[in-house]
Image (cartoon, grey):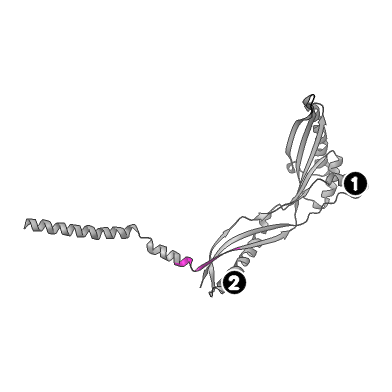
Amino acid sequence: MNIWAKRLGAVALAGGLLAGGSAVGTLINPTTPAYAADSESQQNTITVTGSGEVSVKPDVAYLSLGVETTAATAKDAQSKNAASLQKLTALLKDTWKISASDIQTSQFYVQPNYTYNDKEGQKVNGYTAYHTLRVKYKDLDKIGQLLDAASSAGANRIDNVTFTVDNPDQYQEQVITKAMANAGVKAGIIAKAAGRSLGVVVNVVQNDGGYTPIVKQGESFLANASAADSAASTSIETGELTVNTTLTVQYSMK
């Protein structure tokens, strides 16, 4: 009796392990049905990219005004540069009423100038001091007059004028609304072509957007300013810039 009891017990234990193994296998892979559901739900969606943009007039300008001076020594070049820059800064603050917070040094350096010949090799031939100001200015109708005045005050390097908007976020509602409408049109066309109808929005992701400032390069500014002595002031056109965004939008399909 004991022998048979032991054998039956072993069989029962083995069966229990087999059954238990099956149960454990089910517990280890509980996500299989959910994965199938996810796949099915993905087959009933449409994902498109919508874009929106608006053209706006700039409301602020950033001017790059520089003074470049040369002298036999670094000290003299820097001293001459400081005197010219002081005159330019006084003009901006006192005559044009530009706040000190809107005037910032963007670049300053003093460097040697070299000459070279076969007999003497490389030699230092004086020094150049260069100081650039980044000036924020909002009266865009007077930009040309300001450039002329700066040139007369000693600014002999006018590298560029950048036009932009002070607060581009104020246009976000407009561009997002346009981007959603654009996405809806695309998704509707796709659903119709597939013999389905468009459902609700499932997910929206805003991609990188923004705006591109308008940069007017300054190669001709000084030439124009010189001509302005006997003619009208330098003419600067602000143009328009574009504020834009793109949205990745997922819709359900019916």
In this view, the residue farthest toward the top is 120
The picture places residue 104, in percent across and down from the top left corner, at: 73, 40
Q: Residue at x 75, y 53 (%)?
A: 59
Crowding at label 2, few (<14), some or many (≥20) Cα neighbours within 10 Å?
few
Question: Is residue 193 toward the left or the right of residue 226 in the image?
Answer: left
Image coordinates for residue 194, horizontal then vertical, percent: 54, 73
Q: In what element is the residue under mark 1?
A: helix
The residue that mark 2 highlights is 189
CA gap, disc 1 and disc 2? 58 Å
Q: Is residue 78 visible?
A: no
Label number found at residue 32:
none
Give the quadrant of residue 181.
Answer: bottom right
Of labels 1 and 2, earlier in sequence is: 2
Q: Above or below — where is 124 with respect to 205? A: above
Span colored in magenta = 40-49
Residue picked out by circle 1: 227
Give whichever of 17, 251 is nearer the camera. 17
Residue 88 visible in the current orientation: yes
State the image coordinates of residue 228 (x, y, percent, origin top left): 90, 47
> What element does badge 2 sit on?
helix
Residue type at numbered disc 1? Ala
Q: Residue at x 10, y 58 (%)?
A: 5
Residue with the most extreme front position: 118
Q: Give residue 50's quadrant in the image.
A: bottom right
Amino acid type at mark 2 = Ile
- Left or right of residue 88, residue 48 in this image: left
Dot 1, how many residues are within 10 Å of its Cα: few (below 14), some (14-19), or many (20+)?
some
Query: In which quadrant of the rendered view does residue 155 lie?
Result: top right
Q: Nearer the viewer, mark 1 or mark 2?
A: 2
